[in-house]
Image: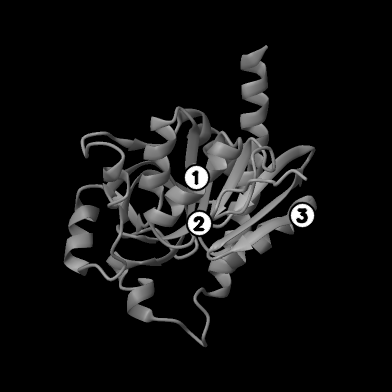
């Protein structure tokens, strides 16, 4: 009898997953994304990691939740990459750091400030955390096709959620438009491994305008407002359509 070897956290084996993966932070969001796929199959559910495979318009897609922060995001990317995934899109939320970005607005970062500790365990801090141009451009193209308002720019990936507000706003004054916790880790690891990564985020508050999630706290035992929940569904659709564009471009390049 052959024993099937599985990676120890995602509990998947090589070949279980697809070339493309969406990476929500929240495990509950993985279940939501699965509803957008045909023939979605739950592969595993362990710790913060929930993994599905399914199909979007004929393209096989993997969904894996990463939990909060860089260390668990790195574990997810490492094990997915070892199993065969090549393209990673973070599907998450963030807090805006500049005025004028409304709650529920979509943000597509092309780079991230590396205030995470995890990426520094892989490479010196001078190494940039940047989205792959193919993934970033495909996300922008897909967002435009939906006609939604979105911003793009640099985000701050911080290991510390309850950071000093003045410190965060200083980053905003430097043109950093939002803060979150995983993009820098995902961008850096993907670049090092010669893989493709990008990120799409929904602003769940605006720290510069006093509506940050840590400030207004949860309303009625819900982490997000109904508007943010609706926009998360929109960003999922954008990310899936970006995968269609990426797949087409990659196949054209191969031929």
The picture quadrant where one finds residue 181 is bottom left
Q: Mark 3 or mark 1: which comes first in sequence?
A: 3
Local SS, label 2:
loop
Indicate which disc residue 25 carries.
Answer: none
Proximity of marks 3 and 1: CB atoms separated by less than 8 Å: no
Local SS, label 3:
strand
Measure how far apart labels 2 and 1 are at the Cα level.
9 Å
Q: Is residue 218 above or below residue 184?
A: below
The front one of 138 and 192 is: 192
Q: Mark 3 or mark 2: which comes first in sequence?
A: 3
Measure how far apart labels 3 and 1 are at the Cα level.
20 Å
Position of residue 232 measured from the top left corner of the image (x, y, whole percent): 58, 60
Proximity of marks 2 and 1: CB atoms separated by less than 8 Å: yes
**Is residue 147 shown to the viewer in this render?**
no
Position of residue 112 measured from the top left corner of the image (x, y, whole percent): 33, 44
The residue tagged 2 is 66
Q: Is residue 77 above or below residue 157?
A: above
The picture quadrant where one finds residue 72 is bottom left
The picture quadrant where one finds residue 178 is bottom left
The residue tagged 1 is 77
Residue at (22, 39) in percent of width and height: 125
Position of residue 26 measured from the top left corner of the image (x, y, whole percent): 53, 64
Determine whether, in the image, residue 83 is placed left or right of residue 152: right
Position of residue 101 measured from the top left corner of the image (x, y, whole percent): 39, 58
Crowding around mark 2 (Cα neighbors within 10 Å: few <14, some 14 to 19, many 20+) is many
The front one of 137 and 99 is: 137
- Quadrant in which the C terminus is drawn: top right
Q: Is residue 149 above or below residue 227?
A: above
Residue farthest to the top?
Answer: 255
The residue tagged 3 is 41
Residue at (32, 78) in percent of width and height: 215
Residue at (46, 50) in percent of width and height: 75
């Amino acid at each position: 009898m052959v024993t099937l070897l599985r990676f120890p956290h995602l509990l998947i084996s090589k070949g279980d997953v697809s070339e493309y993966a969406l990476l929500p932070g929240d495990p509950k969001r993985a279940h939501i994304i699965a509803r957008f796929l045909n023939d979605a199959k739950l592969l595993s559910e362990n710790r913060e990691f929930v993994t599905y495979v399914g199909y979007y318009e004929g393209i096989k897609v993997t969904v894996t939740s990463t939990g909060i922060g860089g260390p668990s995001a790195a574990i997810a990317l490492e094990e997915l990459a070892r199993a065969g995934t090549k393209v990673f899109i973070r599907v998450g939320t963030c807090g805006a750091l500049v005025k004028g970005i409304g709650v529920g607005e979509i943000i597509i970062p092309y780079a991230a400030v590396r205030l995470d500790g995890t990426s520094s365990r892989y490479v010196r801090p001078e190494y940039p955390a940047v989205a792959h141009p193919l993934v970033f451009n495909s996300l922008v193209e897909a967002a435009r096709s939906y006609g939604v308002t979105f911003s793009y720019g640099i985000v701050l990936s911080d290991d510390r959620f309850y950071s000093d507000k003045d410190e965060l706003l200083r980053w905003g004054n430097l043109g950093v438009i939002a803060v979150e916790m995983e993009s820098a880790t995902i961008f850096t690891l993907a670049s090092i491994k010669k893989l493709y990564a990008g990120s799409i985020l929904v602003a769940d508050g605006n720290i510069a305008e006093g509506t940050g999630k840590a400030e207004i706290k949860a309303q009625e035992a819900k982490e997000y407002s109904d508007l943010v929940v609706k926009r998360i569904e929109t960003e999922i659709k954008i990310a899936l359509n970006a995968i269609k564009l990426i797949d087409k471009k990659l196949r054209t390049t191969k031929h």
